[in-house]
Image: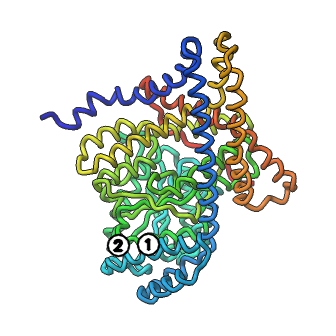
Amino acid sequence: MSSPYAFNFRGKRFLEILPGVITWLILISPFVLSFIRPYWVAVFVIIFDFYWLLKSLNMGGHLLSGYLHMRRDQRIDWLDRLKRMENFDNYFADTQKLYEEVAVPFSKRKLGLELNELKDLERHKGEIINWNEIYHAIFLAVYKEPEEVLVSSIDSIKNSNYPSNKIMIVMAMEERAGGESLKMAKRLRKKYQEAFKDFLIYVHPDGIAGEIKGKGSNLYNAGRNFKKYCDENNIRYDRVIVSAFDCDTRASKQYLPCITYKYIINPDRIHRTFQPIPLYSNNIWQVPAINRIVAFGSTFWQMVEATRPYRMVNFSSQAMSFQTLVDIDFWDRTIVSEDSKQYYRAFFRYGGNHRCVPIFTPVSMDAVKANTLWLTLKNQYLQKRRWAWGVEHFPYLIRECFIHKEVPLSQRLVLIYRIVNGHISWSTASLLIAMVGWLPLILNLKFNATVIAMNMPTFARNLLIITWIGLVVSAIISTLLLPPRPKNFGKMKTVVFVISWILVPISAIFFGSIPAIDAQTHLMLKKYLGFWVTPKEAQT
């Protein structure tokens, strides 16, 4: 019998080509069918628009739910909960009593879920950990970012509502960044050494065979070195929670204690990723209008996914047990999209027993901004294309699904469906909504005289108008998530911010569909993309 890896060798190129072919067929078909089967196109438009109406309303509901979760969890003193959990029996009794007294449906449902987690933990009392045993290792992947950006990130960790003597900063540096970058790291270590349990610097050597130049290979090197550190200091791997941050990631005050709490109450913690919601808001007041919409669009998608955790995969900054990282051999050094790959690698390593736990105490990062409008737009496009390059995981997923027969077939099929549906929708949906409804009318003059042709534009327009309800919800929530307005900006800036949501259709096409098509076409043509680092600017 041939090795299952032979399938990868023979079939990889076909699987790399497949997503791009599907996307281009979907985009080209309406043009062709508008000449020969205009009725088919018209019916498709009506069904597709109705589908997006329902989806928009559904997404708006999930977005509102995600916001309510965030507002609730940010008000909780998670460190106080950790301290009260030192006496588990009393804490369990107090939570059960509170659940019986609460009348607000949303709060009661949340408490009910937490109570079920505590009941599960009670059945595994040997797995209860005292929070004082937990350390946090914050991995900061650094290339050539300004020192001020890193200072803001490290300060946010220092000011966290968590004992700093339980926190280790791990700066993952690149040798190819040059000597100045290393000097900066040493200055930061001197400044913060006493503020944390430790401040570690690991330099990733350049030119290692088989690696690509990117975040994954840098973090892999840091992970291998940190393992030696844990061994030398007799620190248990399962007592360390590793947060893999970008250099501009700022943790909210409740982030570390919240993750510690979620980690402790889950007896299957080694098989979990803890995924905070990223707010691209550090510099949100300073970026152009369309970039603000793109930034909040990314945040809102993660908020929606957080209310549907069965769909979640790792994205950007996330946390895992160091034991998990050791089990999966740290990070993949051969791909660009290392964050989502971490989820898939753990999923198959544990035979399908791996899940994402949403963390509603967010982390904040920079929206894309450069010195000029054109460069800002260009960098935004390149960032979105890099994210869309996650389609590179498709051949890997297919191969692993063939290999890991211990994972139930239903789980494997759902995993494949979601990655295919996600990337194809990403590349096609906004273009289909914007263009396809007009094609039969423009390309087939005979069709214009039919009843369906005369009514279709009105019907489609009315359906799409209703979908703006979702945008109104987005606009309102975005204003509630804004950081304090800088003193040099007047109140009119907030009004402009709300009005700018009318740019959503434009941003969806130029910073959604087109970069996704670009990424899939590169993969289809075997023009592999490398890791593009989003430039960071010091905040002024």
- Residue annotated with mark 1: 135
Asked if residue 292 shows in the view, the reply is no
Question: Please, what is the three-letter code of the amino acid marked with disc 2?
Answer: Ile
Residue 520 placement, left or right of 184? left
Q: Nearer the viewer, residue 424 or 207?
A: 424
Residue 442 placement, left or right of 43? right
Q: Nearer the viewer, residue 187 or 246?
A: 246
Q: Nearer the viewer, residue 50 or 234?
A: 50
Separation (CA) of disc 2 from disc 1? 9 Å
Q: Residue at x 51, y 38 (%)?
A: 388
* Picture quadrant of residue 382: top right
Name the spot of residue 124 as percent of width and height, x first. Answer: 31, 77
The numbered mark, 2 or 1, whose residue comes first in the sequence reads 1
Q: Are marks 2 and 1 in contact (CB under 8 Å)?
A: yes
Q: Residue at x 55, y 31 (%)?
A: 428
Residue 356 placement, left or right of 381? left
Q: Secondary structure under badge 2?
A: loop
Q: Nearer the viewer, residue 499 or 11?
A: 499
Name above or below for residue 478 compared with residue 132: above
* Quarter of the image where the C terminus is located: bottom right
Residue 271, numbered circle = none
Q: Residue furthest front?
A: 451
Name the spot of residue 118 as percent of width and height, x first. Answer: 42, 77
Scheme by which the image is coloured: rainbow
Name the spot of residue 115 as percent of width and height, x first. Answer: 46, 76
Residues packed near mark 1 inside 10 Å, few (<14), some (14 to 19) or many (20 plus): many
Name above or below for residue 106 compared with residue 66: below
Asked if residue 350 shows in the view, the reply is yes
- Residue annotated with mark 2: 235
Residues packed near mark 2 inside 10 Å, few (<14), some (14 to 19) or many (20 plus): some
Q: Residue at x 41, y 39 (%)?
A: 212
Q: Residue at x 45, y 49 (%)?
A: 339
